[in-house]
Amino acid sequence: MHCPFCRHPDSRVIDSRTADDGVAIRRRRACPECGKRFTTQETVILMVAKRSGVTEPFVRDKIVRGVRRACQGRPVDEDQLAILAQRVEETIRSRGCAEVPSHEVGLAILGPLRDLDEVAYLRFASVYRGFESLADFEKEIEALREKRADAPHAAGQAAEEPAP
């Protein structure tokens, strides 16, 4: 690590701490040449492999921009979009791969978006999955209805279980 003050090619780590909920490491460093101190932050760069074969760094803002279009005119605010993007990134990082196909990023968006707003979910899914007919929409709407019908039933079962 080059010193940002004198450009000396080496520095000594004085202290290391986790940052950003364990996603990054913040290091306090000292330059042996000029004696000045500085802080660095290390993060693992998650790469996304696109269909074209190109890889690029994962950017949470791209998730927000894509989902924002699907949420246009819906009661979804910026904080909810930011939380959704964070959930997507956590899901992808939890897989433990340094490179993830873009298709998996799209799949990771669908679940949280469905929970956030069903209309926005249908908009996003129709583009992402390439709906080509009314039947595709009907099939997806029926799946949403089934999920909604199963949700209270599953919650009721969980409430009936005795506490340990």
Image (cartoon, rainbow, N blue to C red):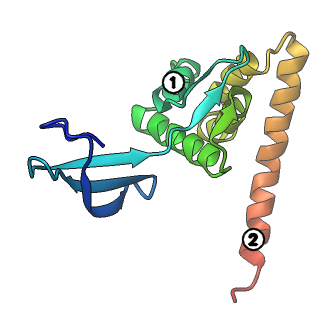
Residue type of the residue flagged with mark 2: Ala
Residue at the (51%, 19%) spot, across then down: 73
Q: Position of residue 61 (x, y in %)?
A: 46, 27
> For the point 63% across and 52% down, which residue is it?
94
Please give the label number shown on residue 62: 1
Residue 84 vertical position relative to residue 125 in the rendered view, above or below: below
Tell me the mark number nearer the camera, choosing from 1 and 2.
Answer: 1
Residue 72 as seen in the image, left or right of residue 115: left
Q: Which mark is residue 44?
A: none
Label 2: how many Cα within 10 Å (few below 14, some 14–19, many 20+): few
> Could you tell me which secondary element the residue under label 2 belongs to?
helix
Residue 78 position, x and y percent, is 41, 32
Q: Residue furthest top?
A: 132
Decide if residue 109 is on the left or right side of residue 147: left
Identified at 62% across, 41% down, the residue is: 98
Q: Nearer the viewer, residue 151 or 25?
A: 25
Residue flagged by tag 1: what amino acid is it? Lys
In the rendered image, which residue does mark 2 sit on?
Answer: 158
Q: Secondary structure at mark 1?
A: helix
